Each structure stands twice: as structure tokens, then as C-alpha cells.
Amino acid sequence: ASTMNKMAERVARQIRDLEDDAEKRRQFLADVAHELRGPVATIRTMAGALADGVADEPDRKERAVGSLLRTSERLLQLVNDLVDLAKLDLKELPIHPRKVDLRELAAAVVESHAAAASQAGITLHGVQAAGAVTALVDPDRFSQVLDNLIDNAVCYAGSGAEVQVTVEAGEKARVTVADTGRGIPPAHLRRVFEPFYRVDAARTGSDGHSGLGLRISLGLVRAMGGELSLTSTEGSGTTAVVTLPRA
Ligand SMILES: Nc1ncnc2c1ncn2[C@@H]1O[C@H](COP(=O)(O)OP(=O)(O)O)[C@@H](O)[C@H]1O
Ligand SMILES: [Mg+2]
């Protein structure tokens, strides 16, 4: 009877897992539709205004065209992210690993965030590294990961915070993005790798952040044979650690 009970329990668990998967898929589809609707509605409104001649006045026309460009740019970014996510899940995203100097790559990505950091009142330090550290990664894809982690620190840490990127060599190569910002409460931290999950849900989409960054970054790092983890303490900061195969 006990084996029968165990089998029944296992079947019940499998059914629950399948239901959870189906529920996740439904939620994902609803989130995608919701995220796409905002920019598409804006584009239609702006195009309509231009077509009606409502925006004939040069000033208004310029604003409408600017908004059309920005919104379609955001829409394209969102669709590109969704394509990356789908390909990662299908293991069809092309990854071309080669020997890369992580210090050099990290320095370039840090540099590209300098202006945004100073505008946000963030002190973005230069890359810390004992020497050159090489790893076996796809340079474009790893830049994408680092870009997202640094963007997160710059956008969410809050004014006054410091951001330090460190590159280290050990058994694995290790890249750390640490900030001294507001941190992420534990209940949210558990969920930040879920697609579309944002701590401040009210800001969804409006600033080109759809909550796909960490999910895609995790997929990319794993596809390169590495790992990505996030630790955070509310009120004192967040640290992202990427480990990668040495070259
Ligand atoms: N360094 C950080 N400090 C505080 N919150 C963060 C940090 N990094 C990520 N987050 C939170 O995790 C959420 C998910 O991040 P991400 O997947 O990159 O999506 P996005 O940046 O598009 O919102 C962010 O919306 C933010 O609320
Ligand atoms: Mg992000």
C-alpha cells in the first residue's frame, strides 16, 4: 500500500508541476501583450496626429516625430529582447566564445555608462583588477550581460551610491558589479530573474526597462558555461557576481 501511496503522490506532484508550467506560460503571454500594447498605442496616436495634420505646427510636428522615433526604438528593443529570450530557451542563440581580456572588455562597458552615472548622481569607479584576466566568452554577448548589470546599478541604486566593477582570476574568472545603493528586499530578490519582474512595477516599460534584463543575462551567462547570482541587503547595496570559464 505504501508503494501505491508513493506512486499516487508522485503523479499528483507531476500534475501540479504541469499546471504550474501552463500557468506560467499564460502569465508570460499576458505580460508580453501588456508590454507591447503601450508603445504600439503611442505610435498609433502619434502617427494619427501627424496624418490628421493636427501636428502641422513645426514645434508640435517635431515633438510628435521625436516621440514616434523613441517609442518605436523602445518597441524594437523589447522585441529583440523577446527574440533573445525565446532563442535562449530553445538553445538556438548563436554564441561564439573566444579568449577575451575581461578587464579590457569591462573597462569599455563601464566607460559607456559614465555619462548616465554622473547624471544619476552615481559614482562609477574604474575597473578593479590585479592584472589581465582572460576568459572564454562571446565578447558581444558578455558585453550585453555587463551592460545590463551596470545599467541596473546606475538606474536602481539611487543617487549618492557608488558602483565598483571588479575582475578577478581564480579557478574561474569572476566579474563583480557591486553597488552601495538601496538594495532589494528579500521577497523581491527571489523573483528578479523572472521575466518582466520589476521591484517598482509602477514604472514598467515607461523608461525602456521591461524586467527582462536579468533573465536574459542569466541565460547568456549559462550558455557560455558560467553562472550569475545576485545578493542584496536592503539599504546597503546589491552585488552581482558572474563566474566564467578561464581561457
Ligand atoms: N542593483 C540593483 N539595485 C536595486 N534594484 C535592482 C538592481 N538590479 C536590479 N534591480 C531590480 O530588479 C529588477 C529587474 O531587473 P532587470 O531584469 O534588469 O529588469 P529591468 O532593468 O528591465 O527592470 C529591476 O526592475 C529592479 O527593480
Ligand atoms: Mg536591467
Image (tube, rainbow, N blue to C red):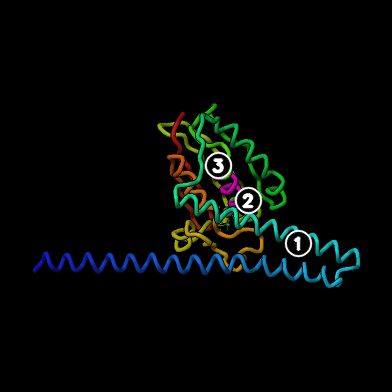
Q: CA distance from mark 3 to mark 2?
A: 20 Å
Compare residues 66 and 87 and report the one nearer the observer. Answer: 87
The residue under label 2 is 154
Q: Is residue 215 visible?
A: no
Q: Are marks 2 and 1 in contact (CB under 8 Å)?
A: no
Query: What is the three-letter code of the residue carrying label 3?
Result: Arg
Please tell me which of labels 3 and 1 falls first in the chain. 1
Residue 146 magenta-highlighted: yes
Q: Which residue in the rendered view is the most extreme toward the right?
A: 57
**Residue range corresponding to the magenta coloring:** 145-152
Residue 203 sits above or below residue 112 on the image: below
Badge 2 residue CB within 8 Å of ligand 1: no
Q: Residue at x 55, y 59 (%)?
A: 211
The residue under label 3 is 141
Please tell me which of labels 2 and 1 falls first in the chain. 1
Residue 9 sits above or below residue 223 on the image: below
Element assignment for label 2: helix
Q: Residue at x 67, y 66 (%)?
A: 40
Residue 223 sits above or below residue 73 on the image: above
In the picture, the disc for residue 68 is 1
